[in-house]
Amino acid sequence: RKEVEQDPGPFNVPEGATVAFNCTYSNSASQSFFWYRQDCRKEPKLLMSVYSSGNEDGRFTAQLNRASQYISLLIRDSKLSDSATYLCVVNGGGYSTLTFGKGTMLLVSP
Amino acid sequence: NAGVTQTPKFQVLKTGQSMTLQCAQDMNHEYMSWYRQDPGMGLRLIHYSVGAGITDQGEVPNGYNVSRSTTEDFPLRLLSAAPSQTSVYFCASRSDLRGEQFFGPGTRLTVL
């Protein structure tokens, strides 16, 4: 089983839609979790950290399910500017154990 | 703050040539790392450093060397370039193990 798995997509949605991505991880000892956003030919940038109780930042909601070892990202009222690749990142605790998923591509159309 | 800076932005090398990719950060971060990103492979860790004078290997270190003489700088050296090293290289830094990782804009390297 791969360490961090994501559906590569692309997810094609119209503006205003709600879309959700899931990410599964294999290391049950993982300690921290993040969603990063990467625009085409740009560097990844932190979108939000994922907390055990779940957290929200505007139109974005992140959830963590430790029992099933997955995290999710929900985007409400999608905008054209949300089109990007979303990377799931899991930190096992040590420096070298920051593991990136391969990303899920989102395309929002008018 | 400039954040994490990388030079050059683009580079073309011939097989067997050597070169150094530069990375600098002005956030006084202890932790720095180098990744390569290839289509379908995601980001893979090449080398990392937990402070000046301390470096270690990541997932794909072969063919690359690093050094960390100062907190600010973390250059990546390609010893003898091979076509398999054609990739986009990102340098990153963070202040602690649980914190946000900041990436540089990347270097797009082609080895012919």
Image (cartoon, coloured by chain):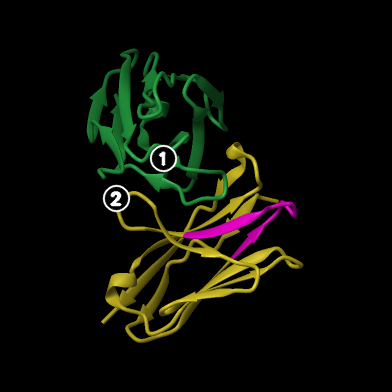
Q: Residue at x 40, y 69 (%)?
A: A106
The quadrant of the rendering that contains the C terminus of chain A is bottom left
State the image coordinates of residue A73 (x, y, percent, origin top left). 52, 71
Subunit of label 1 = B
Determine the residue located farthest toward the front in the rendered image: B28
Q: Quadrant of residue B23?
A: top left
Q: Which span is picked out in magenta? A: A23-35
Q: Which residue is mark 2?
A: A41
The chain letter of the green chain reads B
Chain A, colour shown: yellow
Is residue B55 a member of the stretch shown in magenta?
Answer: no
Q: Residue under mark 2: which chain is it in?
A: A
Residue B8 point in image, percent of width and height: 23, 31
Q: Position of residue B90 (x, y in %)?
A: 38, 39
In this rendering, do the residues under marks 2 and 1 share a single chain?
no
Q: Is residue A58 above or below residue B78?
A: below
Residue A21 vertical placement versus B79 (above, below): below
Task: From the image, tell me which residue sits under label 1.
Answer: B92
Q: Amino acid at mark 2?
A: Arg
Kind of element beneath mark 2: loop
Residue B51 versus residue A104: which sits nearer the camera?
Answer: B51
